[in-house]
């Protein structure tokens, strides 16, 4: 009897120990780094929607799972920020006027027969995976013709949306440019590499720090060489041009690979060059400096407008770089339309 | 039987008395050792952060975040000596740097508004006497810096300033070894002498710069003393007349490389006679030729005393060396300020 009790106690202890182990270590909410990775919006076509094979003259669903895996919201409370455009071969597949279905009207709204506008929130401390939405379109195959037994056809879904990259980092402002000043410093100016991205498809990969001397005024001007790269699978488009890009209208090369950049050191705006022109948003009284990506990459030089007294000791200051751009990519699925044989 | 019991009691009492005596003896030895310890050591002021002040992480979950930096200051050396009426001067300060003054502009120092970009505390306000027989542990005090960070100015997710606390202060080294004065060290007669001329090695003297060795050489007309000294405190030795450049101040010059590694020879006395004017090599600072330079933290001077006709036999006498210098040592701690969105 006693032996049985002992075994029972040991068993309970074993379970309790394993329970403790199972709880694991949790990362505190405030320590989550949401600005990581190279993902922005992702669009996934659900399995069998559309199906791999389908008979002619048959309705079928196209279900798109949208997930904002990046750290920036697409759209806001007042406006949609992206468009999904469905492309089909019109000889084989049709879309009706009211083909789109979605869970909430607030999230998406059909803009025309083939397009739907949407908004979707990105990653945040409280929602570290970003929001997900399902958008469904009801399509129908047409007859494939008397001479054919089957036809291959593609369904394409193109996403166009406004997005952005925000990098916040600590920079050492070291007024002792050549390291001649004796003694311990709070920090030393050095180049920074960012291999993990900032939670957006366009990433700042490297920042080189320089302190430019101005001997006459006894100041230094911090300058930063900022390396930018499109690490995603899509194309960068000019910010605000997403409705045009997803409209099916002809586009010029000027709409592509253009993004606006802003830099701030200790919340003082930096002068960033070279740029491909400036546009002023008069309503917001903001000027946008555009830069062009070449082979998906670019380098921009941002310099402090005002200098820093050379007699100041080294200190760590926050550097913020903001990129605004549009982004577009396409996912597709090939399906086989078969003739329904009726004997 | 009664007699036997009495004997036991007497033995027990004798044993207890012996323990008390032994304990008393041990105590008096420790006291002696402590009084000796008061004049040894390799440090001047030692500053340390108190635990969790500042904390490793600060969650910025309100509009204003206070950054508490509490440090303890110990005087591990022998300066200032209360019996010599020595005091800390206005140039003896502890100051804080390493953070962005635009982000953290307001500081309270010991509960008073600082009004300075780099807050500082004068040591003259602190109870930090040097070690002495009455206070063998040296002075101890604390200093509190409290910064106020306005979160609306912090537009990045994380800011990691490195708070550098630097102490800049005058310090004095006093060494009084006994040297042998022998006018005829190589005399042929086998007379018995009171002492032999030889190099004297010294331990440290309760200061960050220590006199480490004295070599004596007898010349035809003089006694030469080569006095070695060394920076043993791990900080920087600064020319005492340039100490006002140590702490940052508006429109003040910064310390230069040439202001470093210089000690002022206050006096060198053989018996009661100063031989300071004979000391070489000396460095000049602002027209004063009282300085000796350190190379790789070590330096020496050679001072000579004239041989007097009346000295016929060997004798021992104190050689007093007094060095004055500025000293700087720093500690730093990085604090991660996590910007958590509120509301």
Image: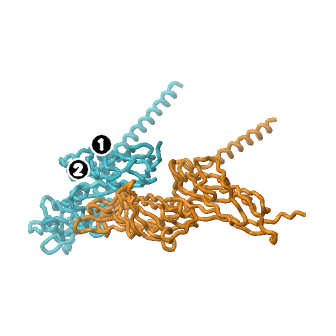
Name the residue at 51% across, 74% down: A295
Query: To which quarter of the image does residue A232 belong?
Result: bottom right
Q: Secondary structure at mark 1?
A: loop
Mark count: 2
Disc on res. B80: 2
Q: Is residue A54 left or right of residue B25?
A: right
Q: Colour of chain B?
A: cyan
Q: Quadrant of the N terminus of chain B?
A: top right
Q: Chain of mark 2?
A: B
- Left or right of B286 in this view: A88: right
Q: Give percent across and percent down for residue B260.
A: 25, 65
Residue B314 at x, y percent in the picture: 18, 65
Give the label on residue B110, or none.
Answer: 1
Subunit of label 1:
B
Residue B53 against residue A41 in the figure, above or below: above
Nearer to us: label 1 or label 2: 1
Q: Give the letter of the orange chain.
A: A
| Callout 1 crowding tier (Cα within 10 Å): few <14, some 14–19, many ≥20 | some
**Residue A218 position in % (x across, y down):** 24, 65
Q: Quadrant of residue A212?
A: bottom left
On the same chain, marks 1 and 2? The answer is yes
């Amino acid at each position: 009897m006693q032996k049985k009790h002992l075994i029972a106690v040991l068993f309970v202890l074993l379970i309790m120990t394993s329970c403790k182990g199972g709880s694991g270590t949790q990362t505190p909410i405030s320590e989550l780094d949401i600005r990581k990775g190279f993902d922005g919006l992702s669009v996934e076509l659900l399995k069998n929607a559309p199906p791999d094979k389908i008979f002619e003259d048959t309705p079928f669903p196209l279900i798109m799972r949208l997930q904002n895996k990046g750290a920036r919201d697409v759209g806001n409370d007042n406006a949609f920020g992206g468009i999904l455009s469905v492309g089909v071969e019109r000889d084989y597949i049709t879309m009706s006027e009211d083909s789109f279905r979605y869970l909430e009207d607030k999230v998406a709204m059909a803009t025309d027969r083939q397009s739907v506008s949407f908004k979707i929130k990105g990653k945040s401390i409280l929602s570290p995976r970003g929001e997900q939405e399902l958008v469904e379109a009801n399509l129908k195959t047409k007859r494939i013709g008397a001479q054919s037994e089957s036809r291959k056809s593609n369904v394409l879904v193109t996403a166009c949306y406004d997005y952005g990259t925000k990098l916040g980092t600590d920079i050492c402002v070291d007024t002792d440019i050549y390291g001649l000043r004796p003694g311990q410093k709070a920090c030393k100016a050095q180049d920074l590499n960012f291999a993990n991205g900032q939670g957006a498809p366009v990433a700042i990969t490297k920042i080189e720090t320089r302190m430019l001397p101005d001997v006459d005024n006894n100041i230094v001007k911090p300058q930063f060489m900022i390396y930018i790269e499109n690490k995603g699978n899509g194309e960068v488009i000019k910010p605000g041009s997403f409705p045009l890009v997803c409209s099916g209208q002809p586009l010029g090369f000027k709409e592509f690979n253009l993004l606006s950049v802003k830099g701030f050191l200790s919340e003082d705006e930096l002068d960033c060059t070279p740029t491909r022109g400036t546009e002023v948003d008069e309503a917001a009284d903001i000027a946008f400096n555009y830069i062009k990506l070449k082979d998906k990459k670019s380098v921009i030089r941002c310099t402090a407008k005002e200098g820093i007294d050379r007699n100041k000791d080294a200190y760590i200051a926050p550097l913020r770089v903001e990129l605004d751009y549009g982004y577009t990519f396409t996912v597709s699925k090939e399906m086989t339309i078969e003739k329904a044989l009726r004997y | 039987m009664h007699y036997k019991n009495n004997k036991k009691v007497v033995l027990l009492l004798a044993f207890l008395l012996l323990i008390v005596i032994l304990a008393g003896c041990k105590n008096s030895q420790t006291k002696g050792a402590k009084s000796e310890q008061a004049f040894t050591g390799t440090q001047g002021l030692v500053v340390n952060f108190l635990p969790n002040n500042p904390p490793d992480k600060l969650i910025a979950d309100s509009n204003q975040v206070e950054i508490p930096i509490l440090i303890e200051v110990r005087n591990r050396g022998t300066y200032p000596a209360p019996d010599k009426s020595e005091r800390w001067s206005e140039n003896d300060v502890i100051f804080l740097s390493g953070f962005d003054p635009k982000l953290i502009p307001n500081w309270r120092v010991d509960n008073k508004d600082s009004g300075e970009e780099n807050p500082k505390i004068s040591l003259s306000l602190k109870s930090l006497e040097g070690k002495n027989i009455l206070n063998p542990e040296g002075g101890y005090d604390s200093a509190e810096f409290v910064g106020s960070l306005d979160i609306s100015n912090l537009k990045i997710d994380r800011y990691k300033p490195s708070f550098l606390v630097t102490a800049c202060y005058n310090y004095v080294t006093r060494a009084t070894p006994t040297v042998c004065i022998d006018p005829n060290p190589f005399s042929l007669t086998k007379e018995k002498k009171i002492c032999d001329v030889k190099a004297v090695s010294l331990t440290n003297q309760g200061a960050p710069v220590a006199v480490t060795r004295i070599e004596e050489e007898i010349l035809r007309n003089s006694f030469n003393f080569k006095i070695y000294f060394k920076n043993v405190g791990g900080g920087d030795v600064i020319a005492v007349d340039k100490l006002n450049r140590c702490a940052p101040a508006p429109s003040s010059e910064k310390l230069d490389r040439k202001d470093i590694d210089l000690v002022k020879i206050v006096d060198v006395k053989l018996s009661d006679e100063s031989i300071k004017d004979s000391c070489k090599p000396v460095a000049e600072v602002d027209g004063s030729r009282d300085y000796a330079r350190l190379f790789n933290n070590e330096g020496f001077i050679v001072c000579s005393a004239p041989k007097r006709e009346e000295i016929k036999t060997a004798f021992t006498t104190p050689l007093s060396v007094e060095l004055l210098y500025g000293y700087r040592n720093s500690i730093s701690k990085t604090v991660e300020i996590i910007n958590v969105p509120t509301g």
